[in-house]
Structures are given as C-alpha cells and as structure tokens.
Image (tube, rainbow, N blue to C red):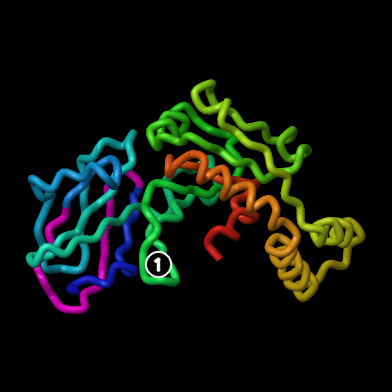
Amino acid sequence: MSIKPENIHVERQEGGTYQLSWEFTAPAEISVYAGTTPDAIDTNSALLKTTDTQASIDNLPATQRHYFQLQSPNGESWIAGERRLSLPNIQNFRDIGGYRTKDGRQLRWGRLYRSGHLADLTEDEHAYLQSLGLSLIVDFRMSDERKDSPTRLKDIIEPNIHLMDVWPGSATGFQAKISEGGMTLELVADFMQSINRDLVTEHTHRYAELFDLLLEHNEKPALVHCTAGKACSILTC
C-alpha cells in the first residue's frame, strides 16, 4: 500500500474549503475524487493529482456533505470524509465511519452519526441534516432534558425518532456534590470515571435496542444523540 488508511484526515474549514492530509507507506502520485455519498464518487475526472501528503479542495457546494476517494496508480483506493461535521449549533456531530474493526475491516462512512441535542438548528443546518438522508434518530436523553431542549426537526424526520432514556446513577451523586459545594478536581475526575463506567455497564439493554433498530433500518443513515454528544460516545470506545 502507498497510504495508511487510518491516517487519512478530512476537515472542512470556514468558507467551505476541504483540507485533506494522509501518510504514505511508500510515495506515489495520488488522484483525489469527490462525491456526495460514499457510493457515488465520480472517478471519471480527478479533482487533482499530487505526490504531496496534503491537498486543499474548494468550489464544492457548501449545502452538501462530500466524501473523497484517494487512488494510487496501481488502483488501490481509499474513501474518507469529515470526522467532525461543521454544524456550529450541534455539539460533537461526528461520523463513526472509517474506524478500523478488530478483524481489519473498516466501518462505512455516512451510515452512523453521534451528536449532542438538536434544539438549536438553523435553517441551513436543518437542510444539511436532511441532505444526509437520515432515516432514524435515537435520543438517549432523559425527559427533563428533552423538555428543556426540545428537538426541532420538520415532519420529514419526526416519525423516525426513538426515545431511549440513558442516565448513569453516578450522575445523581455528581449533581448533589456540586450543589453542596467543595467539589475538587480529584472528585470531578473520580465522578467522571464512574459516570462513564455506568454508561457502559448499566444500559446494555438500551444499546441492544439501538442495534436492533439499526438492523431494521437496513444500513440507512442513522443519528444517535444525547445532550452533549458524550453518553453516545460508547459507540466509539
């Protein structure tokens, strides 16, 4: 191979320019192609060819997400996209695609996302979410969190929202200690470790429900979210 697939990075900068970078195992001329889905990348005409380890791509429509295919002269190719999507009013909106699996395969891009709540969407962000083709949204928040920050989506997505409350027991003690005062850095670290441990051990039934839903939706794009995009980080641990 000429490129390390796990070290391909894509970032969309302010103004819409994409910055791509990668690492070589052996230098080669790399052709870069783009498309709006991982399965529909136009390889008839390269955006550019380079022997460098980075490239800037602009003049792509800002209202759509783009994926990039990097191809070496011997025909080897790799697909990559943004890890963290440029949605300022949604915390931690990330694509879980691209991660390597235990058996050496790679999760597909554009199939599963994680994020914080969806209460503050702008019109442009709403249109951008629609362009992702989401067919399922799983909301891990508690009822009071939903009441404080209600999801604001139009009818095209509403019927496919599933509510699955996830609340680690340690979080109650954490909030009580904050109210009492005297919280130290060491206590914060201990509580956060306990909370993340609880998220893994106390809600396995919820995660089982989630994977059942993902299977029912037959690989169509899905979003899993909580309040700040942390409880659903179990998906990438």
Question: Between residues 130 and 207, which one lies in front from this camera angle?
Answer: 207
In magenta, the rendered stretch is 14-32
| Depicted 82 relative to depicted 7: above or below | above
Give residue 98's position: percent from left, percent from top. Answer: 37, 60
| Residue at the bottom extreme of this rendering | 25
Instruction: Tell me which corner region of the image, top left, top right, bottom left or bottom right, holds residue 196.
Output: bottom right
Question: Between residues 54 and 110, which one lies in front from this camera angle?
Answer: 110
Left or right for 117, reference 81: right
Give residue 109's position: percent from left, percent from top. Answer: 37, 51
Amino acid type, label 1: Arg
The question of residue 91 being in magenta is answered with no
Which residue in the protein does label 1 denote?
Answer: 100
Left or right for 98, reference 136: left
Instruction: Tell me which corner region of the image, top left, top right, bottom left or bottom right, holds residue 28.
Output: bottom left
Give residue 37's position: percent from left, percent from top. Answer: 29, 42
Question: Between residues 206 and 138, which one lies in front from this camera angle?
Answer: 206
The question of residue 27 being in magenta is answered with yes
Left or right for 111, reference 234: left
Give residue 75's position: percent from left, percent from top. Answer: 11, 62
